Image: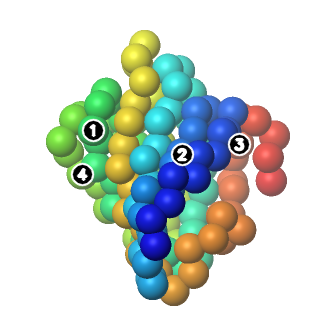
Amino acid sequence: MCATLRTERPWGFWEVLYEGKGFKVKRIVVAPGQRLSLQSHKQRSEHWVVVKGTATVTIEEKTFEVGAEDAVFVSAGQKHRLENKAKVELEIVEVQNGPYLEEDDIVRYEDDYGRK
């Protein structure tokens, strides 16, 4: 199933580009100086490919930078965060894999915007 469902967030937005049984492809844009919550997912893994900008990525206790054309894998259950410390938009393509891909699978540990 193809979709172009854009969802606004305090840190930027994401769009579902394509989804099928057991996977979903999203375009994620993070505004300059913003970051997503420190979170994990019980039932899905995520593959991120940086398309534009530089991502500051936290996975468990490690934090590192990832530039355009680089990729990162986040296993189900790992605490992770995506951050844009730059002055230009960060754009990534995310491929989610797993038996359950809905947004209520997020467990938030820290959130700059007061979400639970």
Image height check: is 86 above or below 96?
A: above
Amino acid carrying mark 4 in the image: Ala
Disc 2 from disc 3: Cα separation? 17 Å
In percent of width and height, residue 6 lies at 59, 46
- The amino acid pointed to by label 2 is Trp
Q: Where residue 30 sits in the image (x, y, percent)? A: 50, 33
Most distant residue in the top direction: 87
Q: How is the image coloured?
A: rainbow
Which is more N-terminal, label 1 or label 3?
1
In the picture of the structure, the residue carrying the numbered disc 3 is 111
Label 2 vs 3, first from the N-terminus = 2
Amino acid at the residue labelled 3: Asp
Q: CA distance from mark 3 to mark 1?
A: 25 Å
How dense is the environment of label 1, judged by Cα within 10 Å: few (below 14), some, or many (20 and up)? some
Q: Closer to the camera, 78 or 88?
A: 88
Q: Earlier in the sequence, mark 2 or mark 4?
A: 2
Residue 14, numbered label: 2
Q: Point out which mark residue 71 bears.
A: 4
Residues marked 1 and 4 touching at CB (< 8 Å): no
Q: Nearer the viewer, mark 3 or mark 4?
A: 4
Q: Dot 4: few (<14), some (14–19), or many (≥20) neighbours within 10 Å? A: some
SS assignment at label 1:
strand
* Mark closer to the chain start, 1 or 4: 1
Which mark is first along the chain, 2 or 1? 2
**Residue lying at 54% horizontally and 45% vertically, measured from the top left:** 14
At label 1, the amino acid type is Val
